[in-house]
Amino acid sequence: MTHADGKPGQSLAERIETLRRAVTPAGTRLPSDASVATAIAARAGTSLVDENTLYRLRTGRTVNPSMKVLKALADHFQVSPGFFFPGSTWGPEEHLALADALRSPQVRRLCMRLGRMSSDALAQVDQLLLGRDV
């Protein structure tokens, strides 16, 4: 499911399984499909993702869920919906760290300002943050 380099696999099923493992404390059992579906329903206020749907996604029997289902899974696992797409090279740890950082109003304001900066200015900020000579 997770490759030797620590990155999640490319299929949706592999990515869901990677998240299940990433959010489960060491030494405890992985959450059941029923418990995840119940938690998603409680958070979303709807049974958009039931136990059977989650099982089919997790095992690769369903490979093309709706965006609403991906959003519900992303919200539950606290990652961006982009995590579930093959082009995403970030692992769950990066997605979880980003989601945590974006809860801060200061970080969100900073991101908004960075989005309006030129590529040269962004390169300088990147060098400054990484401790390289500017």
Image: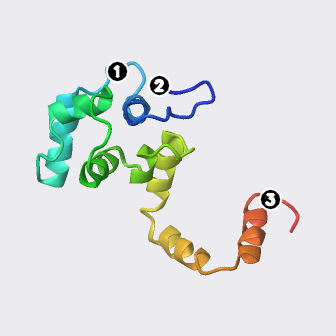
Nearer to me, 112 or 67: 67
Image point 88% across, 64% down: which residue? Answer: 133
Residue holding disc 3? 131
Quarter of the image that includes the C terminus? bottom right
Rendering colour mode: rainbow
Instruction: Give the side of residue 55 with respect to residue 130, left or right.
Output: left
Residue holding disc 1? 28
What is the number of the mark on residue 51?
A: none
| Residue 94 horizontal/vertical position (percent) | 54, 46
Tag 2 near tag 3, CB within 8 Å: no
Q: Quadrant of residue 27?
A: top left
| Residue 124 horizontal/vertical position (percent) | 78, 71
Mark 2 and mark 3: Cα distance apart in space: 35 Å
Extreme residue in the left direction: 46
Q: Give the mark toward the camera: 1 or 2.
A: 2
In the figure, 57 relative to 42: above or below? above
Mark 1 and mark 3: Cα distance apart in space: 39 Å
Image point 16% across, 31% down: which residue? Answer: 52
Residue holding disc 2? 1
Count of all numbered marks drawn on residues in the image:
3
| Residue 53 horizontal/vertical position (percent) | 19, 35
How busy is the neighbourhood of tag 3: few (under 14 within 10 Å), some, or many (20 plus)?
Answer: few
Identify residue type, mark 1.
Thr
Mark 1 and mark 2: Cα distance apart in space: 18 Å
Identify residue type, mark 2.
Met
Image point 15% across, 46% down: which residue? Answer: 41
SS assignment at label 2: loop
